[in-house]
Image (cartoon, rainbow, N blue to C red):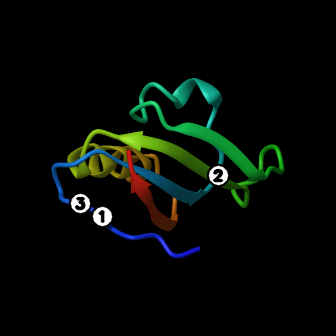
Amino acid sequence: MKISPGKLSVFSPARYRISVLGFLDENMTERLCGLTIEHQEHDPGSSKSIVSLNGSLADQAALLGALNILYNMRMPLLSVEYLGES
């Protein structure tokens, strides 16, 4: 699916999908700027689970904030995907 960047800027709201390796509890949603947490391949207790975070973020500063939280949790980043305007 081809997505047009439209009016994308570092200051505009947009929808993103972030994929990481690890495990996130559902109560982390608020801390991660309201992104929805989905376990794509969940193996309890394994660091090899793939977690997808989806949702709208106010701007790219919020995106970086969420990425920094994941980095500080030592969760390897697999991908960041722009899904369109929010």
At x 39% / y 33%, what residue is drawn? Answer: 33
Residue type (three-letter) at the residue carrying disc 1 = Gly
Labelled pair 3, 1 in contact (Cβ < 8 Å): yes
Q: Which mark is residue 6?
A: 1
Give whichever of 19, 83 is nearer the camera: 83
- Disc number lying in front (3 or 2): 3
Amino acid type at circle 3 is: Lys
Report the residue marked by disc 2: 51
Identify the residue at image location x=68%, y=43%.
Answer: 38
Q: Residues within 10 Å of mark 2 (few under 14, many from 20)?
A: many
Q: Residues within 10 Å of mark 3 (few under 14, many from 20)?
A: few
Q: Secondary structure at mark 1?
A: loop
Q: CA distance from mark 3 to mark 2?
A: 28 Å
Mark nearest the camera among 2 and 1 is 1
The residue nearer to you, when weighing 9 against 44, is 9
| Sequence order check, earlier mark of 2 and 1 | 1
The residue at 37%/45% (across/down) is 66
Question: Around disc 1, counting alpha carbons within 10 Å, would you say few (fewer than 14), some (14 to 19), or many (20 or more)?
Answer: few
Q: Pinpoint residue 20: horizontal percent, then vertical percent.
A: 56, 58
Q: Which residue is mark 3?
A: 7
